[in-house]
Image (spheres, rainbow, N blue to C red):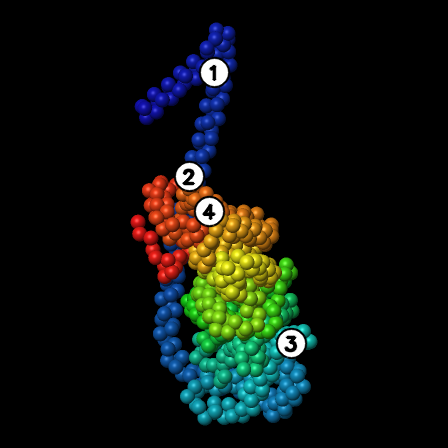
Amino acid sequence: MEETDREAVATAVQRVAGMLQRPDQLDKVEQYRRREARKKASVEARLKAAIQSQLDGVRTGLSQLHNALNDVKDIQQSLIDVNKDWRQSINTIENLKDVKDAVVQHSQLAAAVENLKNIFSVPEIVRETHDLIERGELLQAHRKLMDLECSRDNLMYEQYRMDSKNTHDMNLIHTYFGDMQKLSEELAKQLWMVVQRSLVTVRRDPTLLVSVVRIIEREEKIDRRMLDRKKQTGFIPPGRPKKWKEKMFNILERTVSTRIEGTQADTRESDKMWLVRHLEIIRKYVLDDLLVAKTLLDQCFPPHYDIFNRLLNMYHQALATRMQELAAEDLEANEIVSLLTWVLNTYTSTEMMGNSELSPEVDVNSLDVLISQNVVDQLLSKYMSTLTSNIIGWLRKALETDKKDWIKETEPEADQDGYYQTTLPAIVFQMFEQNLQVAAQINEELKTKVLILCLQQMNSFLTRYKDEAQLYKEDHLKNRQYPQCYVQYMIAVINNCQTFKESIISLKRKYLKNDMEDTLSISHANMDATLDIIAKEGCSSLLDEVFMDLEPHLNELMTKKWLMGSNAVGTICVTVEDYFNDFAKIKKPYKKTMTLEAHRRVVVEYIRAIMLKRISFKNAEERKEGAERMIKEAEQFRFLFKKLAAGSGEDTEGLCDIIEAIAEVIKLTDPSLLYLEVSTLVSKYPDIRDDHIAALLTVRGDASRDMKQTIIETLDQGPSQPNPNYVPIFKEITVPTLTVPKLLK
């Protein structure tokens, strides 16, 4: 209290100090005192009122507690009195057992009387119900069936209450109503027929389907009521619960499965496209059924049935089962592709589950896979294995077909630019394209694998192609008259190499991602190298053909007949030009190579004819005549190959300069300058050997053995500084040693 008083005084002091801060406020002291007195009086009055209210409440509470105590004592006394009365009446209750039995019996009799009319009319109601079922009036038939079941169930329940162990009477009732069970089964059969054809019925007569659903709903309610009574009494009528709703969904599930399985109309033996047809029919049926289920069927069922999603799951499970069955069969490569394309792409595409009319109820992203990734991997592995075998077979067959064309008596076809070709590249790459397009339908990974496989097999195929082209050449050499169009088909083989190169580049550009380019660079390089070898060998074999025809004329060079005016070089030029009329149908990369090689070989053969020492000029006049003839013929060669190389941009004159340089050595009139002329020749063509110089001096005819020896020894001592751009030519020319002894240093 003292602490409180101190706090009150302190507070009062603060308030007074706040009121009297200025001198003019002293005039209002009396006013402040009266105001504080009023506030004090008001507070005291409220405190008194509150305390009085609390005292009145306590007084009222004590009074009520006193009354409650008296009431409890009265109730206690009443319970004691009731207990006494109950104990005294136990014997009386036991004497009322007969009354209780009479009440039960009365209840049973009342039920019997109530159902008496129905009991006597059971046979008639059964007939009426049967007729209604046959006429398709299912709701009325079910109503009568329900009345019969209700009568039977009530009688059996009353019998069960009276004597649950009396099976004789129970069986009697059950037997009397025996036809009712047949009616139930007959009605159920009609219901299930409608359910099986629900997707058709809902379009033609939706009211019939609604009636079936109403009947099933009625039975579900009766099932629930009977089960609840069983929990209370232990009694349940025979045949309950019927579970018709569960049976309905089972029927729908079997119907869906049968519909999916029944779409296979053909087998592989009757139709190679059986699987494609089967999958397309499935796609169409499933899409149509789901659209009907969403737009029509969903309106015939109560919302809690969730009929559309239930059907969607049924179709998905049925499809998964069917796809797994198909995956387990021994499928061919094209069938595997058809199956995987359908499962991985078509199923979720806008053509099926992704159809806009099924949205948003169907979310393709939430659909489970139809077949597991493990099965997909197995199918892809089998597909790649089968495809590998097929590609090998297709390539072998294509090559065999092409080889048959090689021996035809008609020329091969030409492309739009006039170049000879065969159908082999088109067939091969059309096959590759088809397989790559098919693989692309499944996924990018398979497409890349198939491309790698195609290029790998192409590599092996080109090796066989090279071997077959070589055999073709060898067979021709055995009989040059056969085949008749050997040159033209060899040109086609050469052109095919260029077509193969272009097709490989096109295929990679179209189907290979940039980041995969490095993985195939080595393989691509190997194919290019093989194709170049095939083309080079083809060109070489064609030139061999040319030079076999030129051989008699080449043998005339540098002979007496040649010196006397033989037209061997003219014939050589005409023959080469004639062949090159056909060679004009070789594509540019190889035609250019062909022209250069032909030019080189002609010059080599001409120089070889000089080195064979078939002639030795007797005097300066013969040397002059022979040298001028050589220069003239070099000019003929130069003109010919310049004409053949027109448009190639290649310098073809350098090779003929060698013939002219040799002619200058032969033409020289002053033997003392011979060393200088020969040394000039050697400086230009550093691969010229001693035996070449000896042969050349022998052909000249005026160089003694000592002179030859001196020139050769002097040339050997001089430094050799070959032109870095010079392509050796003399190393290909062998000088015979049988007729002229080798000069020793």
Residue at the disc numbered 3: 200
For the residues labelled 1 and 2, the Cα–Cα distance comes to: 33 Å
Q: Nearer the viewer, residue 115 or 286?
A: 286
Disc 2 or 4, which lies upstream in sequence?
2
* Residue 526 appears in the figure: no
Q: Is residue 401 above or below residue 108?
A: above
Q: Is residue 647 above or below residue 200?
A: above
Question: Mark 1, residues whose alpha carbon is within 10 Å: few (<14), some, or many (≥20)?
Answer: few
Residue at the disc numbered 4: 665
| Quarter of the image with the N terminus in it | top left
Residue 143 pos. (x, y %): 62, 81
Q: Is residue 205 above or below residue 460?
A: below
- Residue, x 46% and y 67% (percent of image)? 470
For the residues labelled 2 and 3, the Cα–Cα distance comes to: 86 Å
Element under disc 2 = helix
- Residue, x 32% and y 24% (percent of image)? 3
Residue type, label 3? Val
Disc 2 or 3, which lies upstream in sequence?
2
Residue at the disc numbered 1: 33
Residue at the disc numbered 2: 55
Residue 670 pos. (x, y %): 46, 43
Element under disc 1 = helix
Residue type, label 4? Val
For the residues labelled 3 and 4, the Cα–Cα distance comes to: 106 Å
Element under disc 4 = helix
